[in-house]
Amino acid sequence: MEVAIITAVDSLLSYAKQRQSDIISLIRRFVECESPSDDAMAVNRFVELVADTVTPFACVKTRAGGQFGRHLECEMSLPGRKKRGQILALGHSDTVWPLGTLRAMPFRESDGRLWGPGVLDMKAGLVFFVFAMRIFRELTVPVQRKVVLQINADEETGSESSRALTEAIARQSAAVLVLEPGTGLEGKAKTARKGVGDFNVTVRGRAAHAGLDFEKGANAVLEMARQVERIAGFTRLDRGITVSPGVIQGGTRSNVVPAVCHVEIDVRAPRAADSRYLERQFASLKPFDKRCTIEVTGGLNRPPMERSSAVRKLFSTARGLAAEIGVDLEESASGGGSDGNFTAALGIPTLDGLGAVGEGAHAAHESILIHRIADRTALLAKLVAAL
Ligand SMILES: [Zn+2]
């Protein structure tokens, strides 16, 4: 019996290798169906393509995403008896690339890589998972748990409309596998992610003619300039907390003392408790010029994914399984957020960065390594079979 299982396990990798050209063809189809977050129609075209691809072996539902495309939920029909608790695979259909990017950045295969908008983040990861499911069906490998793939349409813009869905489905899950790319050209798994958020600060002063009534004006831009220095000082690099004023806007004309100035600030923090520190700091802002007022809104919109004992245990399972196919799987902490932040914050064992291996997410050199396609696909299958 033991021997039979080992043989079956080894066959996952060889099957993935045999199917590599089919995997690449599907990646190409996915990349060539562009899906920018802010274009619901384009995202929905991609969602339909994914739905058509998995329909032969999954029960597919879509849910309205408000101003975004539709969110997709696929319950896989797989061989084997099912025990309690499902496995949730999480991905997203949207990319940061506007429609028409393909003209300047077409899908191509060269230098041992696949290139194109969204190939790494995260269309290849979706394809790997689809093929992992095909392996189970075509080799009749039993899977012990129900497996659900959820693909959100708004991840790149903060998952506002999908968050509640992700959290509801995660609560019914024994483990969450996130199909985001791994870290670096080694494809390290992600076992910690910072929490991410935005603060918005508005200073209101008093408008006046810059020549006739200079002294009657309370200059909101000047006040904000002083506040920005203070806000940037909330950064605590030793604790991994970063505070980055990113967009500033104020004034109307140079001959008017400006009445209003806004700033948007990106914040990142590795621990849930850090959000209290940030809220306290922002609440403590006081105007230098007493005639000005300061209004603060915002906070962390993705809680941090902390390296909990549940996360560590899941990683160690993955590491063991990777070793069986000759891969030394390492772990990493990321400054960026994903939908895994939500599931990990609920205490559900979550492992992220299980998608493609490559580099250049959100950049012109976005690409994945072809020689890592088979082992990443096999690792996903092995994890689903083992959990
Ligand atoms: Zn992503």
Image (tube, rainbow, N blue to C red):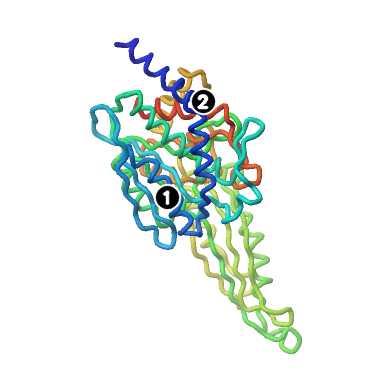
The mark that comes first in sequence, 1 or 2, is 1
Instruction: Please name the residue that numbered disc 1 is placed on.
Output: 47
Q: Number of labelled discs?
A: 2
**In the picture, which quadrant includes the N terminus?**
top left
Disc 1 residue: CB within 8 Å of ligand 1? no
Residue visible at 62% across and 79% down in the picture: 259
**In the picture, which quadrant includes the C terminus?**
top left
Labels 1 & 2 near each other (Cβ < 8 A) = no
Q: Looking at the picture, how far across and down is residue 280, in whole percent?
A: 50, 57
Q: CA distance from mark 1 to mark 2?
A: 31 Å
Q: As rendered, which of 243 and 92 lies closer to the eye?
A: 92
Up-down: is 78 above or below 303? above
Instruction: Please name the residue that numbered disc 2 is placed on.
Output: 329
The disc labelled 2 sits on which kind of residue? Leu
Label 2, secondary structure: give it.
loop
Q: Would residue 386 be found to the left or right of residue 215 on screen?
A: left
